[in-house]
Amino acid sequence: MLTGGAGGRAATRAFTDLFDITRLDPPPMAGRTDRWIFAEMARRHGVAADADTHARLRDRYLVHLAREIAVAAPAKRILPGVRPLLDRLSARSDVHLALLTGNAAAGARIKLEHFDLWRYFSGGGFGDASLERTTVFHDAIQAVARATGVAFPPHDTVIVGDTPMDVAVAVETGARSVAVATGGYAVEDLQRTGADAVLEDLSDLTQALTALGIAAST
């Protein structure tokens, strides 16, 4: 999904609210955890990046995000094929959907509920506590095990993402990866990351299922 820049605006406004800094030097956000983004913003502006600062930034960010997600924007939409694919996967007993996201759990819920996508996921790993996505990956695996009673090894897991950092998590953990060029990276960029499959988007359901290692007819 594309939020029309709601997350970036909310993070910037949270920082200016708390620290009265008007000339911000925002870090790159794609593929990063909220914890890392807030810590890097603090470091760049000489603010202590401690637990209290993070909690204050997160809480203020969530207030702004709830407002910003409702702002109309030409680019704000669910990306092609996402809902049909989630509908197909959620109907299967041998597939378990989980979130692996750098967003704080509450932030992910705000964004996904706006697009009526939250209901597809029973839990996941979130960017509240960790700077690194690999830790979030293991959090997601554990969340699935708690929700289903089934322990999934990394090699039975497929990460779907749109940045080289998403693919890097799969490479480091032993998961498979499907990279989708609907973010800021072209197909050619993603093909150089070592992803197991690279797609323009998810609009072709059969192609998407094949990339995930699932037969379209089952």
Image: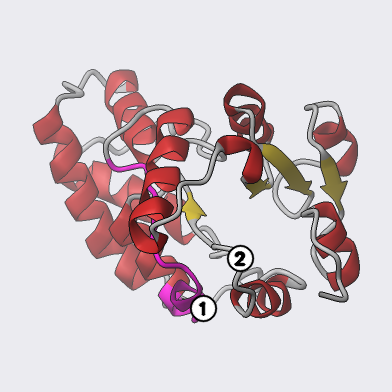
In the rendering, at what x and y percent does residue 76 appear? 60, 71
In the rendering, at what x and y percent does residue 181 appear? 79, 49
Q: Residue extending furthest left?
A: 52
Q: Dot 2 corresponds to which residue?
A: 1
Judge left or right: residue 131 versus residue 214.
left
Q: Dot 1 corresponds to which residue?
A: 115
Q: How many angstroms separate mark 2 from mark 1 (CA)?
A: 8 Å
| Quarter assignment of residue 87 | bottom right
Residue type for callout 1: Phe
Quadrant housing the C terminus: bottom right
Task: Decide which of 32, 154 is in the foreground and name it.
Answer: 154
In the rendering, at what x and y percent does residue 166 appear? 62, 37
Quadrant housing the N terminus: bottom right
Instruction: Kindly state the secondary structure of the residue where label 1 is placed.
Output: loop
Is the C-beta separation of discs 2 and 1 under 8 Å? yes
Q: Magenta region: which residues?
A: 113-128
Residue type for callout 2: Met
The answer to whether residue 95 is above or below residue 102 is below
Which color mode does the image show? Answer: secondary structure
In the rendering, at what x and y percent does residue 66 appear? 31, 70
Residue under the image location 87 percent in, 42 percent down = 187
Task: Decide which of 168, 53 is in the foreground and name it.
Answer: 168
Residue under the image location 83 percent in, 53 percent down = 211
Residue 126: in magenta span = yes
Residue 114: in magenta span = yes
